[in-house]
Amino acid sequence: MYKVFYAVRCVILKWEEIKMYIKSIKTEIINNVDFMNILKYSHYNPTQEKLEKITKAYSKNSNVHPFGAFENNQLIGFIVIKDMNEQHKDYEIIDISVQKQHRKLGVASKLIDYVIKNFDMVSLSAETDEEAVGFYKKYGFSVKLAHVIENVNRYRCEYKLKSKNL
């Protein structure tokens, strides 16, 4: 079994001088209003019941790892990754969202940087809609049309890395 990195790390975003730190929020997401207020941006038709069900699932699944970005001790964004196999090498971003006023400042990129640096992964993937394709391409993910659901294009994004322990 591997250990999840829980240390608090400070990251400074130069263009806005946002002082931000990232930490595990696995034990903090149940009934967390700040988390749910950001979570609603990344889900279709986000009812309170649906958001509560999602947060409970994230907190109970040992293969799911949520990390939050904080500014002045206030949650401004998060990433949730899932370990996709027993070798702990392939991960999927199952959720990533940033408060509207903190978008386009590099918060989501820093969250991805954080999980890549702190997990010995060889691949990181995500499924997204048209709106986020540009973000993933800019980061370096390869993007392919995966399928269409109710006339909405869904894309598969893949980012390949070299394992630190090969």
Image: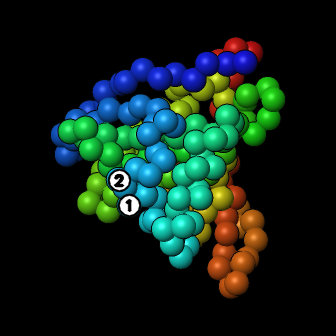
Q: Position of residue 3 (x, y in %)?
A: 61, 18
Pointers 2 and 1 in contact (C-beta within 8 Å): yes
Locate the C terminus and report the quarter of the image it occupies: top right
Quick check: 126 left or right of 75? right
Q: Position of residue 114 (x, y in %)?
A: 47, 32
Q: Position of residue 148 (x, y in %)?
A: 73, 76
- Res. 81 in view: no
Which amino acid does the dot numbered 1 rest on?
Answer: Asn
Residue 123 is tagged as: none
Q: Residue furthest top?
A: 165
Location of mark 2 (residue): 34
Residue at 36% across, 24% down: 9
Quarter-of-image position of residue 50? bottom right
Looking at the picture, tell me which residue is in the foreground, 85 or 73: 73
Residue at 46% across, 65% down: 40
Q: How is the image coloured?
A: rainbow
Element marked by disc 1: helix
Q: Position of residue 96 (x, y in %)?
A: 50, 52
Location of mark 1 (residue): 37
Which amino acid does the dot numbered 2 rest on?
Answer: Asp
Q: In this figure, what is the number of numbered marks?
A: 2
Q: Using a 10 Å C-alpha cutoff, classify the residue at mark 2 as few (fewer than 14 neighbours), some (14 to 19) or many (20 or more).
A: some
- Res. 86 in view: yes
User: Against 165, is 57 above or below?
Assistant: below
